[in-house]
Image: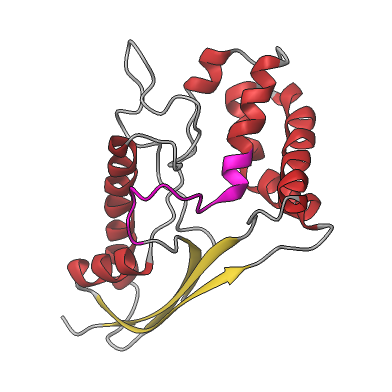
Amino acid sequence: MTSFTSLQWLSQVPAGLLNKREPINKWNVYMSPASPPSVAIRYFEQFQEDFNFFLRSRSQELVVGGRMVISMLGRRSHDIHKKINEFPLFDALSKSLSISISEKLVAEEKVDSFNFPLYTPSTQELEDQVFREGSFTIDYMKQYYHDWMFEDAPNMLSKTCRAATESLIIHHFGEEIIEPLFETHTRILYERLVAGEDIGWCQITVALCKSAA
């Protein structure tokens, strides 16, 4: 059984990111270095709930000793409150949406009410969740880093990001924003590449074995 690059997506945007007075995660569309600590906690709690449900459900489909391999986007730092940019693609997307506001393509309130249901765990968080849920043991875990420091990387990465997020963006903002948004996104990634900034991401692969009841 395998799961590839899907478990970083949550079942829903974490509850409590919007209130009547002020969006808690204003100017961000995911759990970013600029997000308040309470945002990171809400995202982590939603990930715990979803990942535990996934493990529990898959354990019912495997015999004792059965194997499952998971590969998903991850985070290098174990500290969810550490102010480093772990996912440059989505940071660039946040900035692209901010530019869309200044260009009058979208309303600020519309951006403030938008958050991606995405959480990138650390290896320690994955290990802890597997242990706590109890259906599996870890046979193997490795963290990789994809370094995209070559000339056409911004174009390729922006297309990858668009493929993963386009339906969510269209649902919230409408289709007319897509082309200018990702043109800006590509430009931001290119500017960062030229400046020598990191535009890659972390991937974690885990091999699990179904435990005896």
Instruction: Please state, as top left, top right, bottom left or bottom right, where the C terminus lies in the image.
Output: bottom left
**Residue 69 higher or lower than 51, as above or below:** below
For this rendering, which residue is in front, 87 or 138? 87
Question: Could you tell me if residue 143 is visible in this image?
Answer: yes
Residue in view at x 54 percent, y 22 percent = 111
Q: Main secondary structure of the magenta part?
A: loop
Estimate the x, y position of residue 50 in percent, counting from the top left.
33, 52
Residue in view at x 44 percent, y 55 percent = 120
Range drawn in magenta: 78-92
Q: Quadrant of residue 126?
A: bottom left
Q: Quadrant of residue 90?
A: top right
Residue that extends furthest to the right in the rendered view of this protein: 151
Residue 43 appears left or right of 146: left
Q: Quadrant of residue 22?
A: top left
Estimate the x, y position of residue 118 in percent, counting from the top left.
46, 46
**Residue 176 higher or lower than 121, as above or below:** above
